[in-house]
Image: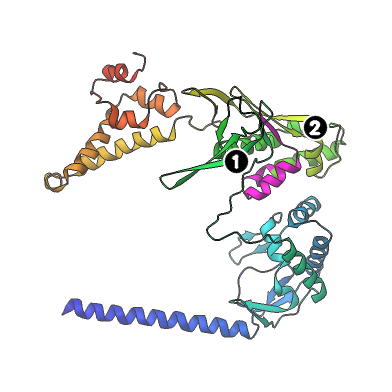
């Protein structure tokens, strides 16, 4: 009877929660239909007084100027760059607890939201329905309608059913040593999608094709660009023709752009790389990347200098897998160069050992034989010699060692010297 009573009480409690949630949703919908401000992120151009939106004249003028500038710009990205050079930032709000939000350069998404926000013409939107608001609009409807028309014209057609949107960061900017463009390709294995940049063999099928993982190369290029932008000495060399006070501002603008790259979308980073003229030439021995010094200065808001190329340092080393030449990217400073698959299987060995040690005799007797065999096979990897584990973590293991070899290929003894001999490590 106790359990039945508890289930009945729980059912009534769940019913009460659903009724309360429904009443709250109805209350919010009714308030929005009356045009009331129901809280949330405060839009630029308004402040809140007595729970109502009140225009701020200076900010309202800024909103109107942004919309006018968009009509004369090619797209939102160009508008964002122009406003960034002018030093325009998002609305700065201080909470009751003293926390500060905003005050940062506007992103592409934030600008798109501002340009399409119907709050600025005195309306309220809730669940796709538009209602007259209690607040006063700060943008004329003809200007707002013109902005919406341009946004609609710039919007791309939706993808076909089942298609996915995937932007390749370096497409069109990377070639191999034969001058062939390296196009983005992908393969699927066990449900996972792997992206690469591969030589277009249609241009020259006689030369060997190169292929490099797209994710690693994209990350390496971004890291190299950030390092270049944060190197004040090299930035000053590019802006040597500027006045002293302009050079100081150049260093600050360059460092600010470097900080934002990590939070920018792939589309925005790609637009930036195209804007500064990135070119990459890839061979099986090295990688050469350059950007335009003049176009970089213009992107930072300064007059361009004489055209010359700035190198981006992307450490790489040649690697051969069978007869196929490849290039291995060196990891950024402070990161491990080890094979993630080998590192993961070593970690699985320690986890399996902990599971076995935590089992009681009854657990061992009740466990399926296949599970015990699996745990035992992986647990023995936790008894590898410390110098072998360290070499795997650093990526210094012999080339023939793979995850399959460690998990299934050999039976490793407990003797460390024998382990080194079987796996091909030099004896100590």
Residue 295 figure quarter: top right
Question: Which residue is denoted by mark 2 in the rendering?
Answer: 238
Question: Which residue is denoted by mark 1 in the rendering?
Answer: 184
Q: Is residue 390 left or right of residue 83?
A: left
365 to 19, vertically: above or below? above
How would you rate the neighbour count of disc 1 (Cα within 10 Å): few for under 14, some for 14-19, many for 20 or more?
many
Q: Is residue 265 left or right of residue 245?
A: left
Tag 2–tag 1 contact (CB < 8 Å)? no
Q: Which mark is residue 269?
A: none
| Range shown magenta | 258-281
Residue beneath the point at 34% across and 31% down: 404
72 to 13, vertically: above or below? above
Is 268 inside the magenta-drawn segment?
yes
Most foreground residue, 32 or 56: 32
Q: Is residue 349 left or right of residue 108?
A: left
Q: Earlier in the sequence, mark 2 or mark 1?
A: 1
Which numbered disc, 2 or 1, marks the residue closer to the eye? 1
Most foreground residue, 267 or 104: 267
Residue beneath the point at 37% across and 25% down: 401
Label 1, secondary structure: give it: strand
Is 28 inside the magenta-drawn segment?
no
70 to 427, vertically: above or below? below
């Amino acid at each position: 009877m106790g359990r039945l009573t508890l289930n009945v009480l729980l059912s009534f409690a769940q019913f009460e929660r659903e009724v309360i949630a429904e009443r709250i949703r109805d209350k919010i919908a009714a308030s929005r239909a009356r045009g009331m401000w129901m809280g949330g992120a405060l839009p630029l151009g308004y402040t809140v007084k007595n729970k109502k939106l009140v225009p701020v004249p200076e900010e309202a003028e800024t909103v109107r100027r942004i919309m006018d500038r968009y009509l004369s710009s090619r797209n939102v990205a160009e508008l964002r760059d122009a406003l960034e050079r002018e030093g325009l930032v998002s609305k700065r709000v201080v909470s009751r607890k003293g926390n500060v939000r905003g005050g940062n350069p506007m992103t592409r998404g934030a600008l798109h939201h501002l340009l399409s926000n119907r709050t600025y013409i005195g309306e309220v939107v809730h669940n796709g329905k538009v209602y007259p608001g209690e607040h006063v609009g700060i943008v004329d409807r003809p200007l707002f309608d013109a902005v919406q028309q341009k946004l609609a014209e710039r919007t791309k057609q939706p993808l076909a059913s089942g298609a996915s949107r995937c932007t390749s960061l370096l497409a069109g900017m990377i070639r191999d040593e034969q001058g062939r463009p390296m196009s983005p390709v992908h393969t699927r294995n066990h449900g996972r999608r792997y992206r690469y940049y591969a030589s277009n063999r249609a241009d020259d099928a006689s030369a060997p094709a190169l292929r490099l993982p797209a994710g690693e190369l994209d990350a390496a290029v971004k890291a190299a660009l950030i390092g270049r932008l944060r190197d004040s000495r090299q930035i000053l060399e590019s802006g040597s023709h500027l006045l002293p006070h302009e050079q100081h501002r150049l260093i600050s603008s360059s460092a600010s752009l470097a900080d934002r790259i990590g939070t920018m979308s792939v589309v925005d980073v790609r637009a930036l790389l195209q804007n500064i003229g990135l070119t990459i030439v890839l061979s099986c021995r090295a990688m050469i990347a350059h950007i335009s010094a003049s176009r970089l200065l213009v992107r930072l808001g300064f007059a361009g200098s004489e055209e010359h190329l700035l190198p981006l340092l992307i450490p790489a080393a040649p690697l051969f897998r069978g007869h196929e030449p490849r290039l291995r990217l060196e990891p950024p400073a402070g990161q491990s160069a080890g094979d993630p698959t080998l590192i993961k299987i070593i970690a699985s060995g320690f986890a399996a050992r902990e599971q076995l040690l935590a089992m009681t005799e009854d657990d061992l007797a009740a466990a399926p034989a296949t599970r015990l065999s699996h745990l035992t096979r992986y647990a023995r990897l936790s008894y590898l010699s410390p110098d072998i584990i360290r070499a795997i973590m650093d990526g210094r293991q012999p080339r023939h060692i793979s995850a399959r070899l460690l998990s299934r290929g050999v039976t490793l003894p407990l003797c460390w010297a024998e382990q080194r001999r079987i796996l091909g490590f030099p004896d100590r």
